[in-house]
Amino acid sequence: MLPTVIALSLATGRTNWRRPIRLVLFMLGLIIPGFIARDIGSDFGYGIATAGRIILFVLIYCFVVAAARITAAPLADSWRMKRVFRIILWLLFPAIGIVLLLASVGLSI
């Protein structure tokens, strides 16, 4: 489910990406559900009950992708952290990692 949800939510949520890229992501996101729908039909036989199962399956995916699409949407205010703060964080990250490593083995600084 994860590759489908990621691909479809990016394809529907990222409105600032080019349409061909979004179309490719959309088509890639439909591959796995297509196989699953085919397997549902081959397991239960084709009929009205199977059509209901497949419709329910598709609706569940639609709800999950609609919820995930919001998180994939571009930021409206395009906020970015200032360069100075990014450099400070990149410099502090290894130091914090070393402190946590030493604390995990029981050594004190």
Image (cartoon, rainbow, N blue to C red):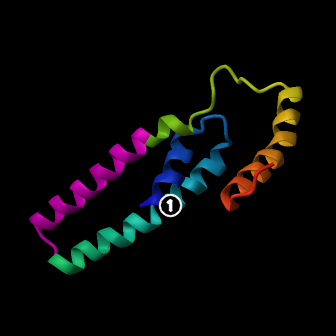
Q: Nearer the viewer, residue 88 or 99?
A: 99
Percent across and percent down for residue 46 are 16, 74
Q: Percent x, y for residue 85?
A: 83, 28
Q: Residues within 10 Å of mark 1 (few under 14, many from 20)?
A: few
Indicate the quadrant containing the N terminus: top left, top right, bottom left or bottom right: bottom left
Residue sitting at 72 percent across and 23 percent down?
79
Q: Is residue 109 magenta?
A: no
- Left or right for 79, reference 23: right
Using the image, determine if residue 86 lies above or below residue 79: below
Query: Which image quadrant is residue 55 in?
Result: bottom left
Which residue is disc 1 drawn over? 3
Residue depicted at x 56% and y 46%:
10
Q: Secondary structure at mark 1?
A: helix
Q: Position of residue 82 (x, y in %)?
A: 83, 24
Specify whether 49 is left or right of 96: left
Q: Main secondary structure of the magenta part?
A: helix
The type of residue carrying mark 1 is: Pro
Q: 34 and 106: which one is in front?
A: 106
| Residue 96 drawn at (x, y percent) | 77, 45
Magenta region, residue range:
45-67
Left or right, 50 with respect to 59, comes to left
Q: Tell me, yes or no, whether the highlighted magenta stretch contains residue 51.
A: yes
